[in-house]
Image: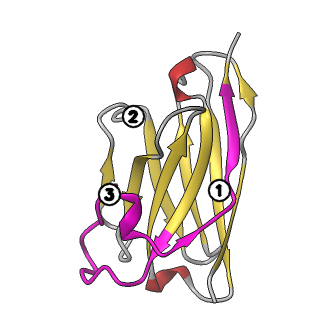
Amino acid sequence: QLQLVESGGDLVQPGGSLRLSCAASGTTLRNYAIGWFRQAPGKEREGVSCISRSGTATNYADSVKGRFTISSDNAKNTVYLQMNSLKPEDTAVYFCAATVSFAYYYTAPGLVPSLYEYWGQGTQVTVSS
């Protein structure tokens, strides 16, 4: 059974950077496409970025394009989300999620939460001066 644990959330000033980690246990992440999502208080969960099982294809929400980068390290069984030029509106709990049922190895799945079967508990990111 796949288990996901996020880490790296923190309080950071606007314009700052953070790197979130999503560490997997129980099985290899190579079998899964991974997505990052976030949820701010009073708002619906929204997709941020995702990466294909191959690690070669990525998708980003328009709100984070050019600022966030998703990557995977199979040796460490971990997926990362590098977040630069952070804004107050990036404040949220960030979740990583995994899907094994997405059929395409070289294509990143969409940023729709219902596509993903496994979820971590989340890590808090607060962007404030």
Residue drawn 58% across the image and 54% down it: 95
State the SS at label 3.
strand
Q: Earlier in the sequence, mark 2 or mark 3?
A: 3
Q: Are marks 1 and 3 in contact (CB under 8 Å)?
A: no
Q: Dot 3 surroundings within 10 Å: few (below 14), some, or many (20 or more)?
A: many
Q: Which residues are magenta?
A: 98-126
Residue 62: x percent and y percent?
Answer: 29, 35
Per the image, the residue denoted by label 1 is: 21
Residue at numbered disc 2: 64
Q: Is residue 76 above or below residue 21?
A: below
The answer to whether residue 97 is left or right of residue 109 is right
**Image quarter in which the N terminus is found:** bottom right
Give the alpha-carbon distance from disc 1 to disc 3, as whole Å.
16 Å
Residue 58: numbered disc: 3
| Whole-percent x, y for residue 16 in the image | 62, 22
Q: Residues within 10 Å of mark 1 (few under 14, many from 20)?
A: many
Residue 94, percent from left and from top: 60, 46
- Give me the residue at 70% from left, 40% from top: 124
Quarter the C terminus occupies: top right
Q: Of label 1 and label 3, which has the lower sequence position?
A: 1
Q: Earlier in the sequence, mark 2 or mark 1?
A: 1
In screen coordinates, is 122 left or right of 117? right
Q: Please check the rendered image and state whether residue 32 is part of the magenta-colored stretch, yes or no.
A: no
46 up-or-down from 110: above or below: above
- Name above or below for residue 71 compared with residue 100: above
